[in-house]
Image (spheres, rainbow, N blue to C red):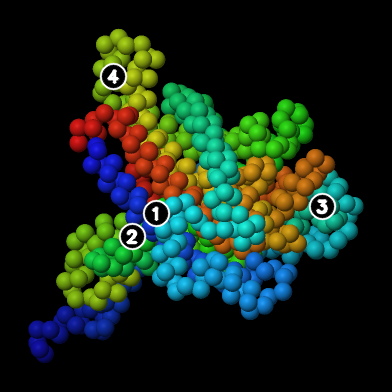
Amino acid sequence: MISFIIRRLLALIVVALGIITLVFMMRVIIPGDPIDTLLFGQPKTEEVVKNMRAELGLDKPLPVQYFNYIIGAAQGDLGKSLTTRRYVIDELGDRYVKTVGLAITSLLVGLVLGLIFGTMAARYKNTAIDTGITALSLIGLSLSPIWLGLVLINLLGVQLRILPVVGNGDLVQLIMPAMTLGIIQAAVISRFVRSSLLEVLGQDYIRTATAKGLQLNKVMTRHAYRNAMIPVVTILGLQFGGLLGGAVIVENIFAWPGLGQLAVKAISARDYPVIQGIVLLAAITYVLVNLIVDLLYFWIDPRLKAH
Amino acid sequence: MEVSNEPVTQQSPVPPGEPTAAFLKATKSKTERGWLDFMRRLFRNRTALVGLFLLFLVIGSAAFAPWIAPYPIDKLGVGPRLQGPTLQHLFGTDALGRDLFSRIIFGSQTALQAGFITIVIAAVVGTLIGLVSGYYGGWLDVVLMRITDLLLAFPSIFLALLILSVLGTGLTNGIIAIGISTIPNFARVVRGAVLTVTAQDYVLAAQATGSPNRRILIKTVLPNTMAPIIVLVTLVFPAAVLASAGLSFIGLGAQPPSPDWGAQLVEGQVYLRTAPWLFNFPGLAIFITVMGSNLLGNALRDLLDPQQRGR
């Protein structure tokens, strides 16, 4: 198990290096001079341009710039924003927490709803309940998060006035975006819960557990769920990437001050260090989450430890 | 020569060149029969029919938009401003007095463009990479798959945003970015399918007959990897429609005067309190498109991959 973790961590470093390389290459092939972005609306003299190039390290040959970027990234220095002139890492920090918070909350909402609906569908297999839940999940899969988000604002914020329409990034404001992403996640997760549970419930050990007189609840929690969770956990890890992506859209609906909002601003302003930072952070988070998921297997399925 | 062979040649009315042609014809009609059978099973599937009907609505709107739409999409003041649905304006009017129904009808064009262009980019390039990688193997395979794995480590919209920041924003660039960001998915799936196919005896047979690799790839390997490609297409199409609407909504795709559904949702958000039809109808339009392709996709997946049935 230890060697597995070490191998995965090494792979993580390779992936991180690859992502850094890709992000660096994007800066090289991006059209337009970053100096133009910096000097927007100001007189552009040769002297100023030269100084700026030196300040940004753009006067050095590309391999040196590349090397410096890797060293910087390893120390958390991703350069300065071209528009605000603040360090990228400072720009991202708080917003990163907000986006990951949104993604995790949405995943929890999706998991809870998915478990409830998936279990119900499996329990009442091939009945009207099962069909209804399958239909609901198909609808959920086809929903645009934008429409769902706007409908929720209109319903809960404007009509019923339960939740605030705008906010300043506090927890109450998190409810609606998390519901938006969570409902769509639930559609995916419930399908996996259903099929996975159905497969496990057909196994011999479930029959044994029932036959020895274990209560249904015990059978479900101790035997069925634990085994049925393995494919579900895999999906959770993969969906996390989708949630980070979905956050980009949803943050812009609900004015949730996360990375997605910043990404839109940065792309419109051609603020490449910020774009690089966001993409780098999102990709590494995604890889890390899937590493954690792989480690969860050991906890869920003790058989794996033997290998 | 003159004695023994004569009855034979007389009996078969086909000249020497014909047998292959006849054989080809026979195999062709066999595949045609396969297609017919496939279509028959597809049309017997209720899910597929509903999906086809919804997609037919969208494709029909896109194809006949100029004839269906009662008003020009960019003419201001064809009706009162911000009026709810009426008989004159089925879906109501927007803040500039434009007819929403006409704009929704025309919006289907950009939505379908997003889906189709994404698939063309991703399926063509991704399939090519997958074919080459899986068939030739070796260092080429290692290099291509490491790059693919790296790109798959990105949540796909971030890859699209990265590409978008290189290309610049706009509807076309947005669709291209979504297309490129989907290439690795196709490359992975096709390579996997190619590995399974090349292990089969018929590929070995083709190699033994001395067919050039390119011919084997196109004539033997590719047709046998079609099922997973089609399955992936049915997953990518609705995702691309959603992603494109998303990019337009956050202002990186189609820009407001365009009747794109994602761009219309921006206006829907502005008048959220007073004019809910402004976000409900574009939202519903996206939903119908995505739902239609999901339903058709589900049916196709069931037909192409019997093991997945009932899942």
**Chain of the residue that carries numbered disc 1 in the rendered image:** A
Q: Is residue B47 left or right of residue B216?
A: right
Residues at marks 3 and 1, CA–CA distance in whole angstroms: 47 Å
Residues at marks 3 and 2, CA–CA distance in whole angstroms: 49 Å
Q: Quadrant of the N terminus of chain A?
A: top left
Q: Nearer the viewer, mark 1 or mark 4?
A: 1
Q: Nearer the viewer, mark 4 or mark 2?
A: 2
Res B207 seen here: yes
Res B169 seen here: no
Q: Quadrant of residue B220?
A: bottom left
Q: Nearer the viewer, residue A205 or A184?
A: A184
Say if mark 2 contacts mark 1, CB within 8 Å: no
Tell me, for residue A16, which label it has, or none. 1
Which residue position holds label 2? B146
Q: Amino acid at mark 2?
A: Arg
Which residue position holds label 4? A207
Question: For the point 30% across and 60% down, which residue is it?
Answer: B194
**Residue reaching furthest top?**
A213
Tell me, for residue B94, which label it has, or none. 3
Q: Position of residue B127 (x, y in %)?
A: 39, 64
Q: Amino acid at mark 3?
A: Asp
Q: Amino acid at mark 4?
A: Arg
- Helix, strand or loop at label 1? It is helix
Q: Quadrant of the C terminus of chain A?
A: top left
Question: For the point 67% across and 69% down, which residue is it?
Answer: A39
Q: Is residue A83 above or below residue A186?
A: below
